Every structure is written in structure tokens, then in C-alpha cells.
Amino acid sequence: MNNKSFTELCYSQLKKIPRGKVTTYKAIAQALGTNAYRAVGNALNKNPYTPKVPCHRVVKSNGEVGGYAQGMKKKINLLKKEGISVTGNKIDSFNENFFEYCKKSC
DNA sequence: CGGTTGACCAAGT
DNA sequence: GACTTGGCCAACC
């Protein structure tokens, strides 16, 4: 079970995100114990689990929605349905809907 | 093993 | 506030 690639581990963290919340690429990387922000984004970009994994709940650290393999419009649309306010390409009340991972024993 | 890429980040201009 | 630069790390060729 631990033989998964870094990419697969990212998906595992994604699935832990509760509905109506969002996180950042950086947070996920740190949750995995690394600083590979880019590797995380790279993993989600090619993610074959698009509907399985809530990749649309992942945004950039500056509050922007970031990107989406199926189109940002779809991503924003999903976020709004989850109860997250999105203005243009940015998250409204970003820190309100922000979800933090438990790095250590939680 | 080296070079390229990417849904990034932070700091500087 | 928008753009540029350097850095970071994993996956792929």
C-alpha cells in the first residue's frame, strides 16, 4: 500500500478534502512531507481519476482557482456548487473555505 | 544519468 | 497590480 507513486499519494490526500472546502497545492505537498508543489500540480494535471478525485477543490496559494484539465469554467462551476464563492478566477473568502491537513498525529 | 516539463511559489522589478 | 526571475520536486524521454 505504500508502494504508490508520489502521484498516487496526491490523490489520496485529495480524497480527504471535505465537500465545500478547498486546499492548495503547497498544502498537499507539505502534507506528504515534501515541498514538491509542482509535482503535485503535475500529478493532478494528468490525473486519470478526474471525477473520482475532487481535484477541483485544489487551488493556488494566492487564492486563484489555478487550472483544470477539463477547463477552469467547469472547476469554478463545481466549486460554486459546493458552496464556495468564486469571483472571476479567484476564490472568495479563501481562508474561510480553506482546509488544512493534519501533518502529525491528529 | 541528464535534460525537459508543469494545474506552483516567493520575491524582486 | 502586472510581469520576470529563480527555485523547488517528481515524472517522463
Image (cartoon, coloured by chain):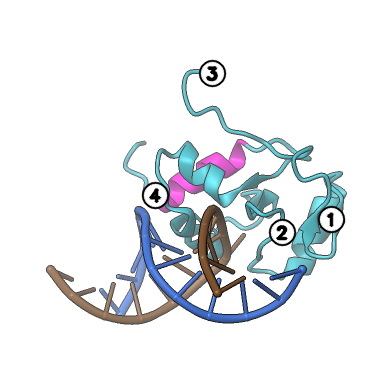
Chain colours: A cyan, B brown, C blue
Residue B9, image x and y in percent? 55, 54
Looking at numbered disc 3 in the image, what kind of residue is underneath it? Cys
* Mark 4 Cα-neighbour bin, 10 Å: few <14, some 14–19, many ≥20: some
In whole angstroms, how far apart are the C-alphas of marks 4 and 1? 29 Å
State the separation of the CA atoms marked 4 and 2.
Answer: 23 Å
Q: Which residue is mark 3?
A: A106
Q: Which residues are magenta?
A: A5-16
Q: Are marks 4 and 3 on the same chain?
A: yes
Q: Relative to the observer, which residue lies in front, B8 or A47?
A: B8
Residue receiving disc 4: A6
**Contact flag, marks 4 and 1 (Cβ < 8 Å):** no
Q: Are marks 2 and 1 in contact (CB under 8 Å)?
A: yes
> With A95 as the anchor, is B2 left or right in this view?
left
Q: Which residue is mark 2?
A: A65
Numbered disc in front, either 4 or 1 = 1
The front one of A57 and A97 is A97
Q: Is residue A83 visible?
A: yes
Residue located at (86% from left, 44% from top): A83
Using the image as rendered, state which of residue A56 and residue A94 is in the foreground. A94
Q: How far is mark 2 from mark 1, CA to CA?
A: 8 Å
The chain carrying label 2 is: A
Q: Is residue B13 left or right of residue A76?
A: left
Q: Earlier in the sequence, mark 2 or mark 1?
A: 2
Element under disc 2 = loop
Q: Earlier in the sequence, mark 3 or mark 1?
A: 1
Evaluate whether label 4 is on the same chain as label 1: yes
Q: Residues within 10 Å of mark 1 (few under 14, many from 20)?
A: some
Q: Alpha carbon of mark 4 to alpha carbon of mark 3: how far?
A: 22 Å
Residue ID at (71%, 59%): A65
Does the residue at mark 2 contact the one at mark 3 (Cβ under 8 Å)? no
The residue tagged with tag 3: helix, strand or loop? loop
SS of the residue under disc 4: helix
